[in-house]
Amino acid sequence: MATPHLVQYQGSKRNIASEISSYFPKRINRLIEPFCGTAAVSILAAKQNKVGKFILNDINKPLVEMLELCVKQPEVLYRQYEEIWNGQFVEGTNNIDYFYKMREKFNQESEPALMLFMLARVVKGAVRYNNNGQMNQSCDKRRNGTRPELIRNNAIQISNLLNNRTEFYNLDYREMLLKAQPGDLVYMDPPYQGTSNTSDNRYYQGVDYEELVNALKLLNDKNVDFIISYDGMTGEKKHGKDLPDYLELTHIFINSGKSAQSTLLGKKEITYESLYLSKNLKCVYENRAEQLKLII
């Protein structure tokens, strides 16, 4: 059975989550995601029975509240979403105008089901915010958003995987990392370099490179294992600076498929996601490399 996902979300690691989880240590007390997004990695880890407890955090409060309602009360989220989704088909309603009406309502109320509807209908599942923190992404005019029945099916599956063993937070990632202890695994997927300015409207909040490096050093000092997805390369073009050598990380690249942007430009280039493993996970990487050699 396929791993459930609630809704489209730009930047989700759903397509490479199985590759990421292959570098998990055998014993994990808690999986902590400080930049959880739609929690693709945690959902897969729960499905694979690799982890028993989870902490999901994101600075985007409506996103976390949407996930929490999905996990704790999936039927409530489904019914609320269904009512909003059906509203665009009421006789005499223009579904594009309806989207912008719901976006305005979301910017006033930020309810979980409205967040879900926004993600289901915005272009590429990509949330955008203005300088006042209000969503300003455009509507995808080609589609009506995920059908409620599919939302319900996936929400129930996600709830079955994560309910009663997940904590939810809306904190700065540095505050969340203070909660990490030896035996935990922290998986991080921060906004990438070049999209991380605090004024960049592609993200609710950016992440400073030096602050991130200092946070990773503190995890090393606490002997907390971590994995971080951070930039990568398209074709031969590298994105951003590597994380510094003194962190003693193992740096690998994961093939994430053809670059959509390059395809639009008539090029055939592959995108590779950078994945960094903390120093204690080097043995996991080496063991997996040996296994792959045996398969080949």
Image (tube, grey):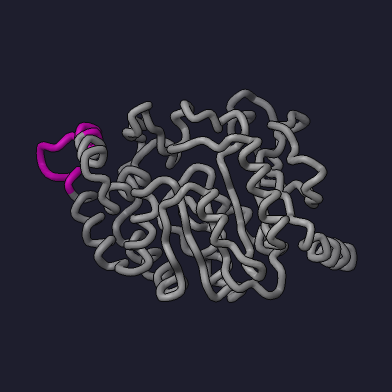
Q: Is residue 70 above or below residue 192?
A: below
What is the x, y in percent for residue 183?
A: 66, 70
- As for residue 47 lying within the magenta part, the answer is no
Residue for point 22% across, 61% down? 79
The residue lying furthest to the left in this view is 92
Name the residue: 55% across, 76% down: 52
Q: Quick check: 252 left or right of 155?
A: right
* Residue farthest top in this picture: 265
Of 249 and 146, nearer the camera is 249
Q: Examine the structure image and report whether residue 96 is included in the region drawn in magenta.
A: yes
Residue in the image at 66% along x and 39% along y: 231
Quarter of the image for the C terminus: give it: bottom right
Point out residue 267 in the picture as x, y percentages from the top left corner.
68, 27
**In the rendered image, is residue 63 in sight?**
yes
**Residue 275 vs residue 71: left or right?**
right
Q: Quadrant of residue 47?
A: bottom right
Q: Is residue 174 left or right of 105 when viewed as pictured?
A: right
Front position in the image: 235 or 48: 48
Q: Which residues are magenta?
A: 87-100
Could you tell me which residue is drawn at 66 percent across and 63 percent down? 21
109 to 265, vertically: above or below: below
Q: Position of residue 62 (x, y in %)?
A: 34, 49
Tell me where residue 104 appears, x and y as whole percent: 22, 35
